[in-house]
Image: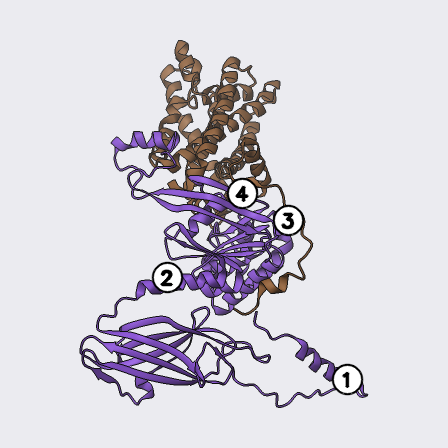
Amino acid sequence: MTSQGEAVLSMEHVSKKFRRGEIYDSLRDLIPAMVRKLGRRSPPGILLDKEFWALDDVSFEVRRGEAFGIVGSNGAGKSTILKLLSGIMKPTRGSITVRGRLSALIEVGAGFHPDLTGRENVYLNGTILGMTKEEIRRKFDEIVDFGGLREFIDTPVKRYSSGMYARLGFSVAAHVEPDLLIVDEVLSVGDYLFQQKCIDRMTSIVKGGTTVLFVSHNLHAVSELCQRSMLLENGKMLACGPTDDVIRQYVGRAQDQRAGEATRVSIEKVAVRGSAGLSTQFDPGENTYIDVAVAAHERVSNLSIVVQIVDNNFYSVFDTCSSRLNDGLSASLEPGDRLECTFKLDMHLAAGTYHVNVYAHEYVVERPFSTWRSAASFFVSETRFVKGAANLYPRLQRFQLISVHSGNGSRGRLQNAERALLKEPVARR
Amino acid sequence: MTVGVAAAQTTTEPQLAPLPAPTRLSGGLGSWLGEIVARRDLMIMLVWREIKVKYKQSVMGFLWAILMPALIVSAGVIVKYAYASLSGKPLQTSDVISVAVRAVPWAFFVASIRFASTSLISNANLVTKIYMPRVIFPIAAVLSQLIDLAIATLVLAVFLIFTGAHVSVQMLWLPLLLAILVVLVSGMAIFLSAAALFFRDVKYIVEVIMTFAIFFTPVFYDVSMFGKWAHILLLNPVAPLLEGISAAVLGRPTPVGGWVLYSAVTSVVGFVGALAFFKRTEPYFAESV
């Protein structure tokens, strides 16, 4: 949203120290440990033996009505941030300010008791999440319908499947109406449809003016939900800004780490061009060429080139392989040889940003000799008529109103509908 | 990638209520207590959960509430009988009543401490995953035992009516004595639940002490039987309460008024100290479970 919004949450220079290993391992250590525990903690500025920073000088702020994402690999400190914000833990240094009622979805179904029925657990879990009994009574039907569990609501949850359990948990959680909602990874529950439902629910929560802080490995979900995000690595904040930029940086870093295996074969060049030369912008349907050049440093046989196109969320939308296109023909290279190939594609992707990944493979073998991710990026320009991942070139063959009313009103209505449809912007962002 | 949430919002932003004042996540004692009061629904739910779970799928149901006191009474009657035959005096009804009225609050005391001291550990997933004023857990544990106490008291009252006990003014002591007992138990519960989180030994120490504590507490006997050593037994803050309860039910004036005051002061000081300890250690719960 806009930058004028009030800060609902802010973290200033927050650090959190953890200790590896056992707190105390012998009776001899017990007394000093006890003193440390109950009396003063170790000095906040210094790392003692076996201690490490789970968070190191992290500052950010989330404004009202904003959805803010946190991405990073395992152990980056994401959950620690959420726990500090929700008050479960206290920072070693720095200060945290929260305005309004905060509710944290760090685990769905927390506090569910297996012997209690779905209905009883809705009340129990709801109050644990901070709702009052009255609030739950009001929203009960909504909650049950959201999870689609009406017929099982009086069954003890120990008889539920894990999917049902999670669905009920999310349904309760999604109906808490806090000023600030903290969500950790809970969207990974349920089947695809339910996940989509969760995202939709989160979107409507955000639209309703609730501030959301969202942590997930699901980059697709983060980019769908959050305008701004933060990238964490080893407790340090590496980037903070528009989600797309942050995700690109995150994935870019992940790729940097994967590169550098190219000892036998290396990818030298990847270029994307249109009929008129190098280009990053394509119109729907335009001819697109991807040039790839690889060099062999050792003798290799059965070399084939795989080109993959991923969308902005790094979901694969397309991939092809030179050997498959070439009736299984692959190349054998002597040291110093180069292989150049060009793929010609018809750009039937819908509008958006795409990235090209290139792999040099020994055909059939899984492990590539060399990988170059995001070797090139290009954009497909918008069309007014299509949304989604692919452009299937729709043509309206029939659009006829069959009216049961006589008279001349029906024709007018059809025209209005048509005009309204055209006025509706099909823009993607 | 699809619906631009941000774009859709700028024009149709709803009129929002003003934000509450910023809260620093480490308020004073006042805000801490306020928070606990604000979450009373949770407390009620947790009590309700304990009761519901205890009586669900159990054949005995509410009989569980009187099983433990009944066992203690039986043991007490055996001890009293042995004592009576030793001293040559016949076993009197008042002896049985005395044991019974001491056994019920004692059962409450033991069960509350046992149950509450593990209340944080057994709710570890909530302690580490969701924020709430955690002191609710030990308090809810005590409250759920209080319900068992109520049931047992009811049964005891029926028993007393059958044995022909009569109502006396001295019974006015009972609410006060019980209130002191609840404060005492709550303080211990709050302290032990937090301590058990940091040191697993606490759980076993509590088990051992609770198993043998009945010998150090006047349940099967009166402190008066110990003559000049009675004062040492009364140092146990539960002792004056049980003595007082027994006397009140039997219609006698409380023999240990000063000691009841001692119990009350100990309980209140202990309770406040336990709250302070709990509040101080609470930020480290999630890391120490």
Residue labelled with disc 4: A97
Circles 2 and 3: CB atoms closer than 8 Å:
no
Mark 4 vs mark 3: same chain?
Answer: yes
Indicate which disc, 4 or 3, sits on the residue closer to the N terminus: 4
Which shade of the palette goes to chain A?
Answer: purple
- Residue at image position (35%, 76%) is A270
- Residue at image position (31%, 39%) is A23
Counting from the top left corner in percent of width and height, residue B231 is at 42, 13
Looking at the image, the residue that sits furthest to the top is B228
Indicate which disc, 1 or 4, sits on the residue closer to the N terminus: 4
- Determine whether A291 is above or below A14 in the image: below
* Few, some or many residues within 10 Å of mark 2 (<14, 14–19, 20+): few
Viewer-nearest of discs 4 and 2: 2
Q: Provide the secondary structure element on which disc 4 rests.
A: strand
Residue labelled with disc 3: A134
The brown-tinted chain is B
Asked if residue A155 can be seen in this view, the reply is no
Q: Provide the secondary structure element on which disc 3 rests.
A: helix
- Residue at image position (55%, 26%) is B179
Separation (CA) of disc 4 from disc 3: 29 Å
Q: For residue A412, which numbered disc appears in the image?
A: 1
Indicate which disc, 4 or 2, sits on the residue closer to the N terminus: 4
